[in-house]
Image (cartoon, rainbow, N blue to C red):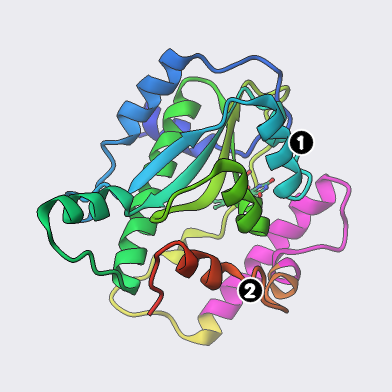
Amino acid sequence: MSNPIQDCMTAHSSVRDFKPTPVSAIVVERCVEAAQMASTSSWIQAYSLLQVHDTGEREALAELCGGQAQVHEAGAFFIVMADSRRHRLVAQTAGCDHVQNLEGFLVSVIDAGLFAQNLALAFESEGLGICFIGGLRNKLDEVDSLLQLPQGAWPLFGLCVGTAKEKPDGRPRLPQSSILHHNRYPTDLDVTAATEAFDEVAAEHYTQRGLPGRNWSGGIARRFMAPLREDLAAYYASKGARLS
Ligand SMILES: Cc1cc2nc3c(=O)[nH]c(=O)nc-3n(C[C@H](O)[C@H](O)[C@H](O)COP(=O)(O)O)c2cc1C
């Protein structure tokens, strides 16, 4: 039996072509309020959301994100940040050390991810389209300078929100048997067989969109042939994160 929340989740597809209609502050506040109720490690709430309103800054960010026009064309653009800054200030006020390590970085990234997905879903439940923007991490030093980010506020990805010109078809997902395991992780043989079965689904998806000859595994193999964004550790460390 379906329910409206699950229907909204399964209807998701990323939108990259937006009408110029703005997203009202009331809608933003309502969706952020709902998203903030995402679970949070030890109640630390280690995230922030930065809405970028300035047109010039959004155009500059669109370029920094790899020329992704939706960053300035969508009704609203946000940056999702893992945020340890307020915890540092709490420690400072209390006269305590504020110690960072990989666990501190991870919990803030997990908190921010859970909040962000809740937020995306809240917007989608209002009939709006969304697109996350990992391209934000292409040139984090420049994003940082543009937005004058303080120590401890770590930008992770962007979020475009707005009215879709046209809702794209969803991309298929792996069969549930590929990702839901019972008691033990499956053998490599089983994982590979399930992946090959999904390749056929993905190949059909590509063919229907005029891209015959592609499948999922090919894209994944290419995606991990060389490391991406190798300067991230240095950037986050320079902003107070500890990655070990
Ligand atoms: C953290 C994250 C970063 C993403 N970055 C981008 C991006 O920079 N540009 C883009 O067009 N889509 C981006 N996406 C959207 C994915 O490409 C998309 O979710 C995926 O291909 C599945 O398609 P669907 O969302 O339409 O189902 C991102 C998604 C996530 C979760």
38 vs 100, nearest the viewer:
100
Please provide percent x and percent y for residue 212.
88, 57
Which element carries disc 1, helix, strand or loop? loop
Assess disc 1: are there few (<14), some (14-19) or many (≥20) residues with their C-alpha within 10 Å of its C-alpha.
Answer: some
The quarter of the rendered structure image containing the N terminus is top left
Q: Is residue 157 magenta?
A: no
Q: Are marks 2 and 1 in contact (CB under 8 Å)?
A: no
What's the distance in space between the residues labelled 2 and 1, CA to CA? 25 Å
Residue interval drawn in magenta: 191-219
Q: Amino acid at mark 2?
A: Glu
Name the residue: 57% across, 50% down. Answer: 144
Q: Is residue 217 magenta?
A: yes
Name the residue: 46% across, 16% down. Answer: 25
User: Which numbered marker is on residue 230?
Assistant: 2
| Vertical side of 50 occupied by 186: above or below | below
Res. 132 visible in picture: yes
Please provide percent x and percent y for residue 225.
72, 79
User: Which numbered marker is on residue 69?
Assistant: 1
Q: Main secondary structure of the magenta part?
A: helix
Q: Amino acid at mark 1?
A: Ala
143 vs 177, nearest the viewer:
143
Dot placed on the residue nearer the N-terminal end, 2 or 1: 1
Res. 16 visible in picture: no
| Vertical side of 241 occupied by 226: above or below | below
227 vs 127, nearest the viewer:
227
Q: How many marks?
A: 2
Which element carries disc 2, helix, strand or loop? loop
